[in-house]
Image (cartoon, rainbow, N blue to C red):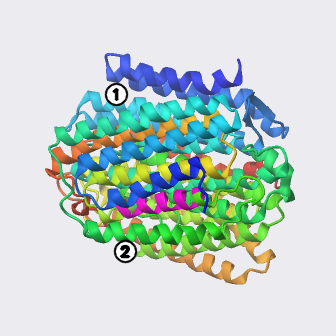
Amino acid sequence: MNLSLIDSLAMGAALVGPMMAGSGHLRTNLSLYGVQTALLAVASGLVADSKHEPTMYVVALAIVVLKAIAIPFFLNWIAGRIAVRTDSTFWLRPPVAMHLCVLFLGFSYVLSQQLPVDAARHYSQIGATAAISLVLSGLVLMLTRRLAISQIVGFLVTENGIYLFALTQTNGMPLFVEMGILLDVLAGVMIAGLLLFDIKKSFEHIDVEKLADLKD
Amino acid sequence: MPPLLLIGTIPVTAALIALILPRVQATRMVVCLLIWLQFVLLATAWGPVAIDNGVVNIAHDLSADHIGILFVLLTTLVAASAFTHAPFFFAREEMEPGYRASRERLYYCASALFLLAMSFVFLCDNLGYLWIAVETTTLCSAPLVYYSATKHALEATWKYFIICSVGIAFALLGTILVFASSQSTGAGGSLNWKELVALGPQLQYPLLRLGFIFCFLGYGTKAGLFPLHSWLPDAHSEAPAPASAMLSGALLNSALFAIFRLSQVVIANNHPQLVFDLAVVGGTATTLAASIFLIRQHGIKRLWAYSSIENVGLMLVAIGFNSPALFFLQALNHSLSKVALFLLSGNIIQALGTKRLSEIRGLLQVSPAWSILLAVAACAVTGSPPFGSFISEWLILAAAADSKNYVVVAALLVSLAISFVAVCFYVTRVISGSPPRNSAAFAVTGTSLVPALLVVVCLIAGVTFVPLYVVGIR
């Protein structure tokens, strides 16, 4: 199989997903998230180059600065402040979660074959596989981890997958929309981060399984 | 005034005032007046356009059509009612030991921006902007749910934030798929729903179908679609009463409106069956499930939250039958009566110091005015004649019967009956009996003002048929 550079980058980013699911170390996970996002940013730069769309460079740059650098640093700072280093409690042990993600990668390949994308024009099956597997990896992270901060990371991975899907399967969303989405994600992470402080303060843990007082 | 300034200036000013003004007591008055000014300005500038069935062009990819204007006005009215009641609510909150002025400032700032974000949902032509606006409503309303900063509020906020964000993320995937479905049409793809409707049958159906399903589930999470509703009762119950009123009376409408816009695209693509299958079936299931949940409730605000879910189901059914008029009618009647109920429940909780339905007894002896209003508003929300919701629910049932979907009719009738009985049971229990001894002092006139006015408007809407003329049914 011949992989284009963009496809290889997308696949590289997708492979970071199982790695994150396999690591319980928060700092490693955040760094991996940064790497993954940087790979996607490079891929966006290449797409911008091949399609001659200067606005895409702006998006790629914004992704590097905000998502690949600022968000991991911010979350790392918070993790340091609330003194959490490892996500030691899992519903699913990390190796199992990692293998599940690898299985999902294969499953994504099957799913991407079913995708009714116009084959003649904008179709990159590898890109679609990578995107779907990132979405699924993010969901695995959100569902298997207990700590609130890991849920944020899982959400961000899912969001990366959705971005990759837009990148590989469409000919580019309008700049305003991309920027708006980016800002919303950033603001969401900020608010979630501030909530983390308060969860730690009033519950003395950030274990979401114990946030279960409210029910009918 | 340019329409963009008309919609944005006052909420932004109100948000800034809330942060800057040194006395919170002054903020309460100023913000309330500003939001009413916003309502009057919008009603005078856009109301005539809506009645003429015209369109206000705001900017590129932003415009207000007939139903958009109606919903913006309804949202602003709901916000204005909540802001009018808020001074009474916070005057009582000030006496609580945990009260902090800084939190109230944040509350005012966030709710003004919340109003702005919700208004934008109804004005976006671009589905990408629509997504951004809906996500911004989550961001702005999280501080409202978190107002009291208790453990329970924190838990409710976290659930609200995470569940809705993930839901909305799927709506983004859906939006991208809808965009992808328009790419084979030559123009290189569009996100503008008017252009998508114009392209109609040219859109690739398989992609559009996938996109619509994702958007339906994503925005449905935000609207409280069963079984994705788990965040809704928590958030509505933990938020302060004026915020619950805005969440229930305005936010749910805006999430449903996003589904409505996308359903128009699918229908233009000649696949009304997909919209029918998802919205009517999903809506009926939601209504039925919510009415069953209503039978056994422990918190007074949770009771109204489940009743909101039930109404969301009814509105979804209206969307499924491709009837924007019925959708708006049901939204209008539900919002007015539900805002009254949430504000009254806030009064009751403050006076009796408990949210638990089993502990709230003897309201008639505590305050006859509240009791009467609560009973009347509960009748209005359950769809009893002569209130407006009776007409809209009747018309939805008639639409279902006309299309020969007797299973839907039967399921809706059963759930409306169950919820009527359940709400009547709990309201009678709250009103009768003897009150707990420790009820606090409160101002009856001020706290009854807004609910009373809303109930009167509900009654007028039901007796005079004015809303029917406005939406153009008669």
The quadrant the C terminus of chain A occupies is bottom left
Residue B177, by quadrant, is: bottom right
* Stretch of the chain drawn in magenta: A127-141
Instruction: Return the mark for residue B105.
Output: 1
SS of the residue under disc 2: loop
Judge the density around disc 1: few (<14), some (14-19), many (≥20) Cα neighbours within 10 Å: many
Q: Which residue is mark 2?
A: B296
Q: Which residue is at 84% across, 64% downward?
A: B270
Q: Position of residue B285 (x, y in %)?
A: 57, 74
Residue B250 vs residue A113, the one in the foreground: A113
**What amino acid does circle 2 point to?**
Arg
Which mark is first along the chain, 1 or 2? 1
Residue A130 in magenta stretch: yes
Residue B97 in magenta stretch: no
Residue B125, by quadrant, is: top right
SS of the residue under disc 1: helix
